[in-house]
């Protein structure tokens, strides 16, 4: 990176720090504690004698809850910036719900853009597909809590209470995501088998009962019928908007989403089951969109075509569910 650009980033970073902590003494003390660094080393960085490393800058930005975008601009360095949007689903507060509700309001506006589009390639069930099925939504919330919390806080699926407001959020997401003028899904052919493996694991460690499994199986059967109807008709019944569904013949590595609506470009990579890292730049959108489109090369379109393949695929998935 040219020295002038590096200096510019450093100046922007210092300005961001001084804006957050105007008192120089307090700023130095914070940096010493955050970076486990001696006072002299901190002063050398603040004077510009020694630059902050990118790792140090990220630690400080997280500590102060400031965006890296505030000191790195598009003209300074060629980088596609993603930020983690994290909601603590175990104990959601008003800010968490507002984040979701604002997001749903945003995608709802896709109905005002005849050129809006959304594409997703996923190795797990996409949230916008299963969010309309309460027992499945509860299962993923249960799995989230199991993975992110200590064993002393792990509760059985049957004892988990999913907040009504969160259920409403998920159902709204399920409905409003149908407003895009064009929708594309590329699904891993092992998606339902992966899910069945998860359910068996929790059954084996006695956190999901047989009655729980029956409820989840009912939702899975209904979900399969829903996806099959989409594949046969090629559109959402509620909006009439077209949807294309591909089944990948190779395993997909992650869950990627990109959407374009009302001059906005959003790209997401799913993390922690529900959360995501997000970018709102066109370069990121193009990269993610190109990657999703490339998945089609090793996939089979089952929407309004491939009747024999489609029938065989859904028959296999129903067998996977029946074996639970």
Image (spheres, rainbow, N blue to C red):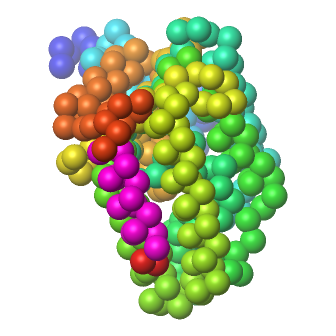
Q: Is residue 264 above or below residue 133?
A: above
Front-most of residues 321 and 175: 321
Locate residue 143 relative to residue 281 in the image: left or right.
right
Say which quarter of the image contains residue 68: top left
**Where in the figure is residue 94, as x and y percent of width and height?**
79, 47
Asked if residue 75 shows in the view, the reply is yes
**Which stretch appears magenta?**
309-322
Q: Residue placed farthest to the front in the image?
A: 308
Front-most of residues 19 and 78: 78
Residue at image location 29% in from the left, 45% down from the top? 309
Residue at image location 22% in from the left, 46% down from the top? 249
Q: Please tell me whether the stretch drawn in magenta is mainly helix, strand or loop.
A: helix
Say which quarter of the image contains residue 191: bottom left
Locate residue 296 relative to residue 283 in the image: left or right.
left
Residue 318 forms part of the magenta stretch: yes
Front-most of residues 295 and 164: 295
Residue at image location 69% in from the left, 36% down from the top? 175
Q: Is residue 16 above or below residue 206?
A: above
Residue at image location 55% in from the left, 61% down from the top? 221
**Where in the figure is residue 186, as x and y percent of width and height?**
36, 38
Residue 310 forms part of the magenta stretch: yes
Quadrant of the image containing the N terminus: top left
Q: Is residue 302 above or below residue 127?
A: above
**Where in the figure is residue 88, as x and y percent of width and height?**
63, 57
**Where in the figure is residue 82, as x and y percent of width and height?**
41, 33
Asked if residue 12 shows in the view, the reply is no
**How many callouts does the rendering have?**
0
């Amino acid at each position: 990176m040219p020295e002038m650009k590096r200096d510019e980033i450093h100046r922007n970073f210092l300005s961001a720090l001084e804006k957050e902590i105007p008192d120089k003494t307090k700023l130095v003390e914070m940096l010493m504690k955050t970076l486990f660094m001696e006072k002299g080393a901190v002063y050398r960085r603040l004077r510009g004698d020694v630059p902050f490393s990118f790792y140090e800058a990220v630690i400080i930005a997280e500590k102060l809850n400031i965006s890296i975008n505030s000191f790195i601009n598009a003209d300074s360095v060629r980088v596609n910036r993603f930020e983690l949007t994290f909601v603590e689903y175990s104990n959601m507060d008003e800010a968490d719900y507002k984040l979701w509700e604002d997001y749903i309001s945003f995608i709802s506006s896709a109905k005002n853009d005849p050129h809006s589009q959304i594409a997703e390639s996923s190795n797990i069930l996409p949230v916008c597909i299963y969010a309309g099925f309460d027992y499945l939504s509860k299962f993923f919330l249960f799995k989230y809590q199991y993975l992110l919390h200590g064993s002393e806080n792990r509760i059985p699926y049957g004892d988990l209470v999913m907040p009504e407001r969160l259920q409403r959020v998920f159902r709204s997401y399920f409905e409003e995501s149908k407003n895009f003028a064009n929708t594309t899904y590329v699904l891993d052919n092992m998606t339902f088998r992966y899910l069945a493996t998860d359910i068996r694991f929790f059954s084996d460690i006695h956190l999901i009962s047989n009655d729980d499994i029956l409820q989840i199986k009912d939702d899975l059967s209904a979900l399969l019928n829903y996806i099959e109807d989409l594949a046969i008709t090629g559109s959402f019944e509620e909006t009439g908007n077209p949807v294309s569904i591909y089944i990948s013949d190779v395993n997909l590595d992650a869950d990627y989403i990109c959407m374009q609506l009302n001059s906005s470009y959003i790209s997401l990579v799913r993390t922690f089951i529900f959360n995501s890292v997000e970018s709102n730049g066109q370069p990121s959108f193009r990269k993610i969109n190109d990657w999703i489109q490339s998945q089609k090369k090793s996939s089979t379109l089952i929407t309004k075509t491939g009747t024999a393949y489609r029938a065989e695929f859904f028959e296999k998935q129903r067998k996977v569910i029946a074996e639970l």
